[in-house]
Amino acid sequence: MGVLKKYVHQRAWLEGNITEGYGTEEVIEFYVEFILELDPIGVPKSRHEGRLSGKGTIGKKTYICTRDDYFNKAHYTVLQNSSMMEPYVTKHKDFLRSQFLEKNEAWFMRQHIDTFSDWLRKEC
């Protein structure tokens, strides 16, 4: 009711004011959304316009995933969720830890994901 109440300018013709105001707003919304080259008068431009449309954030690195990456990730997921691979997963993680003692846990997990499939092919 608060939305409709703002259309009332004269209390003598409530329904007429509401109908006219609501209809005008619908027409304006239609034109603003469907006419792309419309330059509205009196509507301030967004200070973010042009900065956010189609551009990435500042300092963010883009990564283009190739077909091989999808295959490797899918292959790793299947291997990781197989119960038969449990000893090999543990063995590969231990192998990485013995090779790189000073690295942190996040690095080990990334390296494990990236190299597990190749290591398993050589191991078996």
Image (cartoon, rainbow, N blue to C red):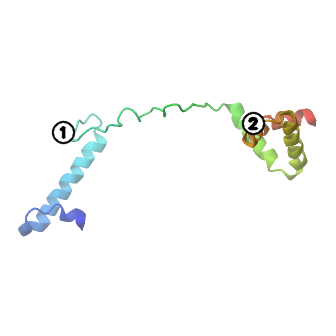
Residue 81 drawn at (x, y percent)? 80, 50
For image coordinates 83% across by 50% down, the residue present is: 82
**Which of the labelled discs sits on residue 87, or is there none?**
none
Q: How crowded is mark 2: few (under 14 residues within 10 Å), some or many (20 or more)?
A: some
Q: How many marks?
A: 2
Task: Tell me the residue that label 1 is attached to.
Answer: 41
89 sits to left or right of 68: right
Q: How crowded is mark 1: few (under 14 residues within 10 Å), some or many (20 or more)?
A: few
Q: Quadrant of the C terminus?
A: top right
Q: In which quarter of the image is the N terminus?
A: bottom left
121 sits to left or right of 7: right
Q: Which of marks 2 and 1 is nearer the N terminus?
A: 1
For image coordinates 72% across by 31% down, the residue present is: 68
Residue 26 drawn at (x, y percent)? 24, 53
For image coordinates 84% across by 39% down, the residue present is: 97
The answer to which of 51 and 104 lies nearer the viewer is 104
**Vertical relation: 17 (above or below) 102:** below
Give the quarter of the image for residue 113: top right
Give the quarter of the image for residue 88: top right
The answer to which of 23 and 124 lies nearer the viewer is 124
Circle 1: element type:
loop
For image coordinates 81% across by 45% down, the residue present is: 79
Circle 2: element type:
helix
The answer to which of 18 and 62 lies nearer the viewer is 62
**Which of the labelled discs sits on residue 72, or is there none?**
2
Q: Residue flagged by tag 2: what amino acid is it?
A: Asn
Q: List the single residue furthest toward the front.
A: 102
Residue 77 drawn at (x, y percent)? 76, 45
Residue 30 drawn at (x, y percent)? 26, 47
38 sits to left or right of 77: left
How far apart, in angstroms, are the residues tagged by discs 2 and 1?
54 Å
Q: Residue flagged by tag 1: what amino acid is it?
A: Ile
